[in-house]
Amino acid sequence: EAASVVENAVGAITANSRISAPASESTDSGAQPQLEYLLETDPVLRTRLVSLRRPGTGETLTITSNGRGDWRVGDQAAPELRGALDVDIRATPLTNTFPMRRLGLEVGEQREIEVAYIDTDTFAVFLDRQRYRRLGRTRYLFQAVDGSFEREIATDKQSFVVTYPGLFTRL
């Protein structure tokens, strides 16, 4: 993933990225090999806009939020996502950075959150409950509340993911 991440003077983040590897775990040689996204947050790192595009097919998905937990997928209201402040884009660890920073957890603290999870294979969007526990200055335990997934994530001092075992390593 090659990303341009810009944090403005008040803390809002805009990220543009092009993922040059498969966006999923699929080994199908016919799988679409690229995904582009634009992601914007407000100054307290609540997701406001996500736009995804598959360059090979032109398929797109746009999700917007008012920052208070109300969402739109395309031009349709998405009440099933109500309450989520974050997105989790399956194909990138960048979306883990926002809740880790915003939650401000002390070592040993944990918190459950709801996110708008985006499956990058299907562009399906659904509400997902996740838990972050701060293990150390730059280490977090990330868990799906339903118990289906767990990883210890290492970050830099700004909570940008450095290693996410089995999935991502920052180069």
Image (tube, helix red, strand yellow):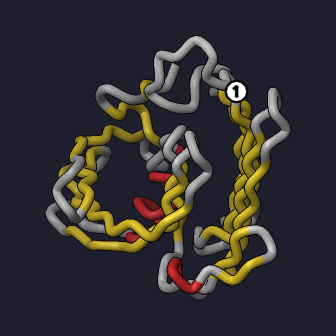
Q: Which residue does the image show at 52% across and 19% down from the upper left?
A: 171
Above or below 28: residue 1: below
Can residue 14 be seen in the rendering of this structure? no
Quarter in which the N terminus is drawn: top right
Q: Position of residue 163 (x, y in %)?
A: 37, 31
Instruction: Tally the numbered discs.
Output: 1
Q: Position of residue 94 (x, y in %)?
A: 54, 45
User: In the shown orientation, is residue 168 left or right of residue 3?
Assistant: left
User: In the shown orientation, is residue 17 left or right of residue 44?
Assistant: right
Q: Which residue does the image show at 44% across and 40% down from the upper left?
A: 161
**Closest to the observer, 145 or 126:** 126
**Closest to the observer, 89 or 161:** 89
Residue furthest top in the image: 29
User: In the shown orientation, is residue 77 left or right of residue 59?
Assistant: left
Q: Position of residue 157 (x, y in %)?
A: 43, 45
**Closest to the observer, 166 or 11:** 166
**Closest to the observer, 110 or 37:** 37
Above or below 99: residue 160: above
The amino acid type of the residue labelled 1 equals: Gln
Can residue 119 be seen in the rendering of this structure? yes
Q: Which residue does the image show at 67% across and 72% down from the upper left?
A: 43
Q: Which of the 4 quarters of the picture holds residue 42?
A: bottom right
Q: Which of the 4 quarters of the picture holds residue 99?
A: bottom left
Q: Which of the 4 quarters of the picture holds residue 155?
A: top left
Give the residue pinned by disc 1.
34
Q: Residues within 10 Å of mark 1 (few under 14, many from 20)?
A: some
Above or below 4: residue 114: below
Q: Which residue does the image show at 53% across and 40% down from the upper left?
A: 92
Helix or strand or loop: what does disc 1 sit on?
Answer: loop
